[in-house]
Amino acid sequence: MVVDVRPDEHIEPDDAEALAATARACALAGWAFRRVGAIDPVLLANVRWLAGYRHPRNHREPAASELTAAFAQPGGLLAGAERVGDRLAVLPVLYHLLWRRILEANLESGVLGPRSMVRRAVTAR
């Protein structure tokens, strides 16, 4: 999916043609296109943070499976990580699972932190 996040006030009348062309190009590539306007700054900060952990090297077993099991019931981010092992080793795996949406947290309610509530995703990918 390609998402255009320019604020509405930055969209000029002539941009409609460019947006339509982008949508057509995305469709030809088999992608979806959506224009959503400005993104909430807290959500953007959290997504940028998690993007740093998107690389598959951050998916390490057995920590990934243990984290998925640990968050079958919602719990605090840091407490759940510490139940699985050393937080310095486990947190990159936890962030990767959040990026992949195997685990989930409300990324709009506040900046991810030790007390952020995390749970196993309803439809883990």
Image (cartoon, rainbow, N blue to C red):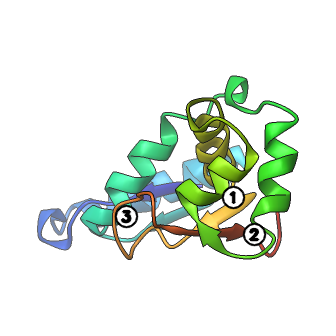
Q: Check disc 1 and report its element: helix, strand or loop.
A: loop
The answer to whether residue 125 is seen in the rendering is no
Q: Residue furthest top?
A: 57
The quarter of the image holding the N terminus is bottom right
- Expressed as whole percent of the image width and height from the top left, the position of residue 59 reads 75, 33
**Position of residue 77 measured from the top left corner of the image (x, y, whole percent):** 56, 59
Please tell me which residue is depicted at 58% across the width and 40% down the height of the picture. Answer: 91
Name the residue rendered at 64%, 49% in the picture. 81
The quarter of the image holding the C terminus is bottom right
- Residue kind at label 1, given as amino acid type: Arg
Circle 3 — which element? helix
Q: Which of the marked residues, 1 or 2, is nearer the chain's N terminus?
A: 1
- Nearer-the-camera pick, 40 or 32: 40
Of badges 2 and 3, the one in the foreground is 2
Residue at (63, 71) in percent of width and height: 75
Is residue 96 positioned above or below 115 on the image?
Answer: above
Task: Tell me which residue sits at (52%, 58%) in the image.
Answer: 23
| Precedes in sequence: disc 3 or disc 1 | 3
Check disc 2 and report its element: helix, strand or loop: loop
Q: Is residue 41 visible?
A: yes
Instruction: Estimate the spatial distance between the alpha carbons at disc 1 and disc 2, rounded to whole Å.
Output: 6 Å
> Is label 2 in contact with label 3 (beta carbons under 8 Å)?
no
- Count of all numbered marks drawn on residues in the image: 3
Q: Residues within 10 Å of mark 3 (few under 14, many from 20)?
A: some
Residue 38 figure quarter: bottom left
Instruction: State left or right for residue 4 relative to residue 29.
Output: left
Is mark 1 in CB contact (under 8 Å) with mark 2? yes
Question: Which picture quadrant has residue 98?
Answer: bottom right
Q: Which residue is mark 1?
A: 101
| Residue picked out by circle 2 | 121
Relative to 81, 51 lies left or right:
left
